[in-house]
Image (cartoon, rainbow, N blue to C red):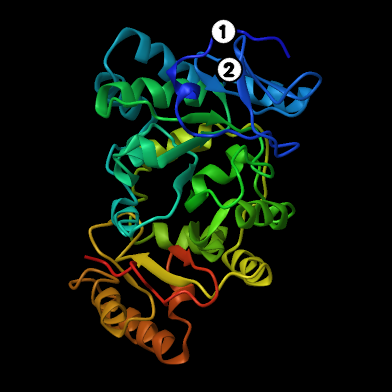
């Protein structure tokens, strides 16, 4: 592949990229990343390394869409804050972050990089880590990379390493180099992650993680996607607007991808050697993240039950009885709309560094 632009300071950082096909170290040469004569080459476009391993992946990396194109156009004409305001009015979303608390739980010492798979508008990236030297942001398309860079240039200037990865089944990072990996459901489709290829994705995570590396998955409860249940819930509360980060992440999808069910994720992670996850949930709902608590904590259960419905609601007594029965029978976690699953390697101290502040 021929180079489309020269490299920027991004790939001149100490971060070591490796070839996702061969595992060899990549070096910058004439605007491309390459292993040597005759080896695979990767374009660096506007400072973003594009790790496309086939023509199909190259087309996927270059794919735009009306949502991202509109946001990019606004970012060229105005500040990122003004563009965000315009975007939210147009798409009915909000800048309110969904996952602030669970990412604050990442404030544990890490013996490696924090790899964020799917950066959205970039707000989550700043929350996740304010130190560019400790982060790698991966996005599936060049359009999203440009959006993230533009926003970060205003909000948190620095040499943020942003890589375009049309596929995360092969990561351009060395073995044992990553201390934490984060992925939430909104980014699944963008990277084409589904139940069919999740095993290969997990195997790659296992390769790049350090011995005490952790994985943070944010996944929705598939039960809440059932049309009947969704219709029932709508009778009692109007749907809350989505966040801008998640709207952008979903808009960067370059093809259909099956949903990743929580049970499938847990079983596959266990099969590949990870310990049982610590499960947290934003309470009382996924739209209110000022309280994120361990699902197995009885205080958290009582808190959720007390806030399940408004106290003046006519169905309070029935809903409370059902919730307490679910707690008694061990069904409670299955009723929550969203889960944050924290996986540590077997033998790691349970819940270490994950207690909410």
Name the image quarter holding the N terminus: top right
First in sequence: mark 2 or mark 1? 1
Residue at image point 30% right, 44% down: 127
For this view, does 166 lie left or right of residue 114?
A: right
In this rendering, the answer to whether 249 lies above or below 1 is: below
Q: How far apart are marks 2 and 1 (CA)?
A: 7 Å
Give the percent coordinates (x, y) of residue 319. Answer: 34, 79
Helix, strand or loop at label 1? It is loop
Query: Visible in this render: residue 67?
Result: no
Label placed on residue 190: none
Of residues 82 and 184, the one drawn nearer to the viewer in this rendering: 184
Give the percent coordinates (x, y) of residue 45. Answer: 56, 15
Residue at image point 42% right, 69% down: 336
For this view, does 319 lie left or right of residue 195?
A: left
Label placed on residue 5: 1
Give the percent coordinates (x, y) of residue 295. Answer: 38, 75
In the picture, residue 326 is in which quadrant? bottom left
Helix, strand or loop at label 2? It is strand
Determine crowd level at label 2: few under 14, some 14-19, many 20+ residues with C-alpha closer than 10 A: many
In this rendering, the answer to whether 243 lies above or below 67 is: below
Determine crowd level at label 1: few under 14, some 14-19, many 20+ residues with C-alpha closer than 10 A: some
Name the image quarter holding the C terminus: bottom left
Label placed on residue 44: 2
Of residues 194 and 231, the one drawn nearer to the viewer in this rendering: 194
Give the percent coordinates (x, y) of residue 342. Answer: 46, 65
In this rendering, the answer to whether 268 lies above or below 210 is: below
Q: Do the residues labelled 2 and 1 touch (CB within 8 Å)?
A: yes
Residue at image point 78% right, 18% down: 37
């Amino acid at each position: 592949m021929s180079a489309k632009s020269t490299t920027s300071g991004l790939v001149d950082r100490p971060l070591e990229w490796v070839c996702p096909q061969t595992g060899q170290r990549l070096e910058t040469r004439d605007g491309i990343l390459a292993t040597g004569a005759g080896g695979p080459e990767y374009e660096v476009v506007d400072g973003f390394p594009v790790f496309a391993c086939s023509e199909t992946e190259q087309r996927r990396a270059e794919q735009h869409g009306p949502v991202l194109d509109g946001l990019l156009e606004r970012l060229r004409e105005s500040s990122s804050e003004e563009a965000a305001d315009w975007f939210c009015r147009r798409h009915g979303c909000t800048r309110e972050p969904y996952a602030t608390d669970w990412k604050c739980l990442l404030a544990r010492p890490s013996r490696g990089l924090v790899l964020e798979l799917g950066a959205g508008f970039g707000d989550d990236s700043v929350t996740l880590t304010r130190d560019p030297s400790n982060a790698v942001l991966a996005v599936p398309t060049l359009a999203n990379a440009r959006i993230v860079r533009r926003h970060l240039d205003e909000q948190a200037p620095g040499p943020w390493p942003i890589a375009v990865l049309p596929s995360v089944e092969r990561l351009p990072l060395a073995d044992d180099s990553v201390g934490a990996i984060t992925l939430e459901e909104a980014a699944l489709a963008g990277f084409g992650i589904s139940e069919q290829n999740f095993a290969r994705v997990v195997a790659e995570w296992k390769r790049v993680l350090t011995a005490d590396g952790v994985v943070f998955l944010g996944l929705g409860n598939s039960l809440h996607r059932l049309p009947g249940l969704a219709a029932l819930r709508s009778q009692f509360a109007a749907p809350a607007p989505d966040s801008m980060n998640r709207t952008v992440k979903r808009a960067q999808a370059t093809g259909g991808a099956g949903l990743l069910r929580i049970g499938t994720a847990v079983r596959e992670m266990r099969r590949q050697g990870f310990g049982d996850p610590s499960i947290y949930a934003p309470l009382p709902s996924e739209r209110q993240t000022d309280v994120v608590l361990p699902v197995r904590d009885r205080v958290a259960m009582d808190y959720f039950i007390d806030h399940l419905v408004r106290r003046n609601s006519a169905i309070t007594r029935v809903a409370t009885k059902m919730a307490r029965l679910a707690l008694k029978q061990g069904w409670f976690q299955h009723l929550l709309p969203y889960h944050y699953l924290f996986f540590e390697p077997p033998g790691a101290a349970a819940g270490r560094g994950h207690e909410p502040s």
